[in-house]
Image (tube, grey):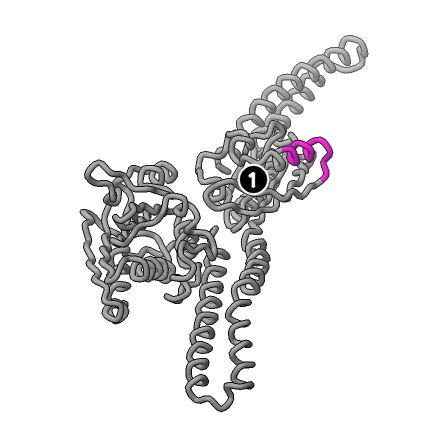
Amino acid sequence: MQHKLDDLIRKTAARVRARDFIWAIGISTGIGLVMYVVGGVVRWDIVLIAWVVFMAALGVRYRFSSGRVWSEPIARVVEMSLHAQQAEIADLQIAYGVAQALPEPLFILDADGVVEHANPAAEKLVGSKEIEGRHFAAVLRSPDVFEAAESVLKSREALTVDFTTAGAVERSCRAYVAPLEIGVDAAPNLRRHRSLIFIRDLTSERRLEQMRVDFIASASHELRTPLASLLGFIETMKGHARDDPEAREKFLSIMQSQAERMQRLVADLMSLSRIELNEHVPPRTVVDLADIARDVVDSHVPLFDQAGAIVDFTNDAQRTTEIRGDRDEIFQAIQNLLDNAVKYGGDPALIKVRVGSGAAPSLAGKGESGHRAGDNAAQTASRLGVQIEDLVYIQIRDFGPGIERADLPRLTERFYRVNLEHSRKTGGTGLGLAIVKHVMNRHQGGFQIESRLAGGTAFNCYFLASR
């Protein structure tokens, strides 16, 4: 490039010198004629000789003056300009790299509210890679943030807005909206006003606050009864039952049962709180659903033998059952469903655990349909934007008495029990299905409960297959 620039300058200089030489001939000729005709004191041959010598000297000067003399200062100016532009480009590349590397969403809008730039975190937030060139109101459906961006463009003063994203799992966010000031030396197409939107995800902080509130409220409510029972038995043992060995053994057994119940309750509350805290962060690890289900069944064989339950495991999947998930959480969800099936699946309980692809088998038969609550395979696939065949399911079915239609929608509520007395006898905390629901929310899957009176209950969990 430098060689071409020098050559261009030399050619331009040659044309300028030729033009100057012609002008010098004309001017010097005119001066000589004026001196000879008007002055009348100079001989024409002397004038001619002087003119020839002057032209020869000028010609020699032009002939041996290199174009480099002309090109060097211009080249230095051009080089300085190029270095300045390269420095600007380097700065822009650094700024772009920083924006791309930021873990938080970043948008840059033009004066019309159209997205000029969005980093990968922003694409992840809105769930689309086709962001740039679209109006911000269509990208992030939060009127408060867009109104703040419009206000910043007019007032040139930064604003902060708190908002909540819609979706299967709500996310609490804070948007910092600030004007982008462009220097007067910027290119004309960059001199328009712009606004920068930087978004912080406050979901974990808000969930942590809510978790503390819920934990205290739940613990204070649910622990009140067993604590009162313990205090009552302690007072009794300190009183008239002090010297009664038979009563003491009976009361100690009841106190141990109540203490174990409180221990289970606290453990379930802590587990539910941890899952809710990270519910907005989808798992990234690839796990095999069939392997996890088989491990849960194998690890619970002693429990099944003790309860006299019969458990049958079947893998009907025609393809891989790998999903993106948290193995421990999925293990706990399947474990909770199996525990429910053992407790409420009849005496003895007959349980079928089935893993497969697509839609899980329905309880409907002989023209009868079961009562349902939650998302079925079609609804889950529609929400995820995939085909039903792209889903992997696990179904845990019992053949117990079934559940009334009115109770189905409330089964995943905290501490909701269809049969409170039976739940207390079997050691239930009322949090098992709530944990399953939040595990499925975190995995962006579907959870459906189907039941028929005298025909049993099926719990279906749908996951997106990992391919």
x, y percent for residue 114: 56, 30
Rendered view: 305 above or below 12: below
**Residue at left 44%, top 63%?**
429
Residue beneath the point at 59% across and 36% down? 78
- Reading the image, the residue beneath label 1 is 107
Q: Is 148 part of what is drawn in magenta? A: yes
Position of 218 compared to 154: left or right? Answer: left
Residue 352 vs residue 102, the one in the foreground: 352
- Relative depth, front residue between 400 and 435: 400
Main secondary structure of the magenta stretch = helix
Tell me, yes or no, if residue 77 can be seen here. no
Provide the secondary structure element on which disc 1 rests.
Answer: strand
Q: Amino acid at mark 1?
A: Phe
**Residue 330 found in image quarter:** bottom left
The residue located at (74%, 15%) in the rendering is: 31
Seen from the viewer's position, the closer of residues 3 and 120 is: 120
